[in-house]
Amino acid sequence: MPSRTDRPLTLLTDYGVGGEHVGALHLALAAACPDAPRVDIAHDIPPGDIRWGALTLSRHAPALPSAVHLAVVDPGVGGPRRALAIGLEDDGYVVGPDNGLLGPIADVLRVRIAVELRAMPADVPRTFHGRDLFAPAAAHLSTGGLLVELGAEIDPAGIVHPRTDPPKVVPGLLSAEVAGRDRFGNISLLARRADLVRAELGSGPLMVLGSDGRAVGVTAGTRFGDVAPGELLLYEDSNRVLSVAQRGGDAWAVLGCVSGSRLTVTARRT
Amino acid sequence: MPSRTDRPLTLLTDYGVGGEHVGALHLALAAACPDAPRVDIAHDIPPGDIRWGALTLSRHAPALPSAVHLAVVDPGVGGPRRALAIGLEDDGYVVGPDNGLLGPIADVLRVRIAVELRAMPADVPRTFHGRDLFAPAAAHLSTGGLLVELGAEIDPAGIVHPRTDPPKVVPGLLSAEVAGRDRFGNISLLARRADLVRAELGSGPLMVLGSDGRAVGVTAGTRFGDVAPGELLLYEDSNRVLSVAQRGGDAWAVLGCVSGSRLTVTARRT
Amino acid sequence: MPSRTDRPLTLLTDYGVGGEHVGALHLALAAACPDAPRVDIAHDIPPGDIRWGALTLSRHAPALPSAVHLAVVDPGVGGPRRALAIGLEDDGYVVGPDNGLLGPIADVLRVRIAVELRAMPADVPRTFHGRDLFAPAAAHLSTGGLLVELGAEIDPAGIVHPRTDPPKVVPGLLSAEVAGRDRFGNISLLARRADLVRAELGSGPLMVLGSDGRAVGVTAGTRFGDVAPGELLLYEDSNRVLSVAQRGGDAWAVLGCVSGSRLTVTARRT
């Protein structure tokens, strides 16, 4: 039976699943804390997409509150950004770069204490902090090591947050930034169902406009069966954020989305 | 040591490996039954391809007969299809949507008892039954909970089966539907070696014709070395079904297969 | 608690992560040695790329020295190549085909004893030795079985090595073969930092020439921040081999690499 101090570990990266980089993280953790369960949250964060990584982490990590969450989306590896380990109010920990990736989860689970990880010896490669800096810190915490042994305490108020533009809401119009997509082409927006209600667009036939001007009819609903095959659905997804799906298809392609583009929802003129 | 009632869990979905949806299933299971081993069977089922998911499940789940098999290929999530948990004669369980996904495994491992899962509370999102309905049911069974606590018993004869057209066999000709492909482009057919023998095509130089009319020579054999590099092999694959491979290449592309297309095998005129 | 003889297992294949073939390996191992931890090193080795699989295995397997390393990149499955199990000096084991895949790890960790696996019964499919031959052998070793029970001892000097051309080094010029790429498009070369130093190119502005004649400026450095966004960096990567990256981009595409192509590094004329 795992000892009481071997916390489970979760992993979230933009390394791409199935590759040697994710493998190297698992090997480092399996060697340092063999009795700690390891759970992969996601490894398909688009390379360098800190914001999408941060949102994904903040949405899923709370499902395993006592875990040590190891998160690495780190295009500035080896650069001046800080490396952090954070103790959360609800018992768990988060370890990763202070480039915005940790801001949303720190908001959701609240910071009890945070430290900046000590720099690595000069002879360690500068390009794989996931394996060489963050994984050892996570293993230290999983096996009962103290947070304060990892570095000097910092002010939690200084933890970096990613840019997440609030939606623009006026009666009859909701404009929101595209945050990401899943495998099915479902589009996750930086908006919530309450924003749609504030825009007085909570029901009825709607239009959605892509950044490139294309306009497609969409129906507000709660499940894919609410629209006919091929039609678009505007719904609160399982992360409780507003999303657009095409039943049986790929909404991302239909609306010509690209990373950082916006979608605008309006009433449909009939 | 895991308690005796913590059964291993297997996972099969069309969510795409490496993404947050598979991660969310693992997190839900790790939180609810931390001592149960979890084994991923496959997550690369083409989106919504219930039949290929059903065949893959029925071929591989029997390797771990005492497990709880959690299977979700569910394009109709939130719609009228039933959600089931099935107790198998050989000890294990299967949990998933009753849309055809569970039919073949129910045939292979035989049903002892089946129940329809109770509907979820109204405030649960309708689009992620994998995490919110099926995973909790699987965790309940893994940790020793009773099947009948999950819902009302149903008649196993009513479990939905996917369409699996039998091959057409006449002397000198075998026509079979394409069921799926693997990473190497090897084509899995809805036919068995016995069908080839019935068609009197068990050996010698053969032709294979794609749906679009292209015709390529193929050799019946048992291993890739039976043909020269670049040539096609017709063989009984490791799932004991008839398959077509190109040595060192991609038979799927060579024969212009698409999902649901057919291949026809005949003797080669020499 | 796992018994003392249940060694961890690592897996490296070209099967593609998320597919039924990797799933079948995990199922076979979970059934045969349920208490042995399983760690995936990589499954995205390009199909049949024995050399890249061999290098990846030799770089990462030493992180878990007491494990049984199951490696399958086996385009000649069912053909005359031998199937081996190797006992390493530092305690662990390697199991896989003797087609070059095992040569580099045997060099790095040194062979204590090696055996050729006994042939399988004739009624076993000839196309999935990973599941049907290598996984059972690995499980046997994980659970404390003896190596000599698996087959007859062979001379370790006969273990096959992959072709790994040494770099060409003259003052002012380093030419090296491209060994592989990661998800970010970073290019791994068959050369080391010492080769660059021998070529008197350890610092300053450099040029890198692709096989197709294109020439791009590159800077020797130690971390991505050493170059501006969009520029190329020549660095010793986390595997301690010479690599080329584009900051925020895909060096593989920029330099038009294909498998087996070469890159040449020279001084930049200013």
Image: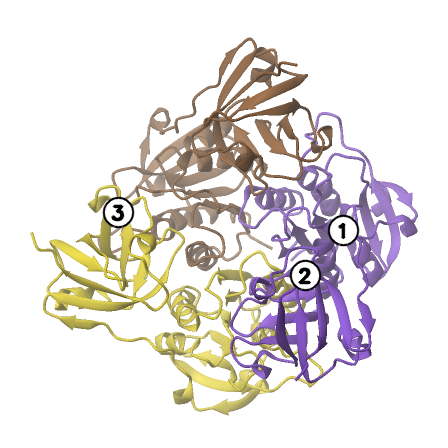
Chain colours: A yellow, B brown, C purple
Is B223 rendered above or below residue A214?
Answer: above
Contact? badges 3 and 1 (CB < 8 Å): no
Q: Of the numbered discs in the image, which one, if any, rests on residue A224?
A: 3
Q: Are tags 3 and 1 found on a single chain?
A: no
**Counting residues from the N terminus, which is met first, the one under dot 2 or under dot 1?**
1
- Residue A5 x, y percent position in the rendering: 57, 71
Label 2 to label 3: alpha-carbon separation: 50 Å
Label 3 to label 1: alpha-carbon separation: 47 Å
Residue C41 seen from this side: yes
Q: Give the residue type at disc 1.
A: Leu
- Residue A7 x, y percent position in the rendering: 54, 68
Depth check, mark 2 against mark 1: the one in front is: 2
Would you name the residue on which mark 2 appears?
C211
**Which quadrant would residue C148 be assigned to in this image?**
top right
Contact? badges 2 and 1 (CB < 8 Å): no
Label 2 to label 1: alpha-carbon separation: 26 Å
Residue at the image point whose x is 55% and y is 75% from the top: C247
Between C49 and B9, which is closer to the camera in this rendering?
Answer: C49
Is B229 left or right of C103, judged from the image as shown?
A: left
Subunit ID for the residue under disc 3? A
Would you name the residue on which mark 1 appears?
C101
Q: Give the residue type at disc 2.
A: Ser
* Other-residue count near label 3 (Cα within 10 Å), few / some / many at <14 / 14–19 / ≥20: many
Is A231 rendered above or below residue B159?
Answer: below
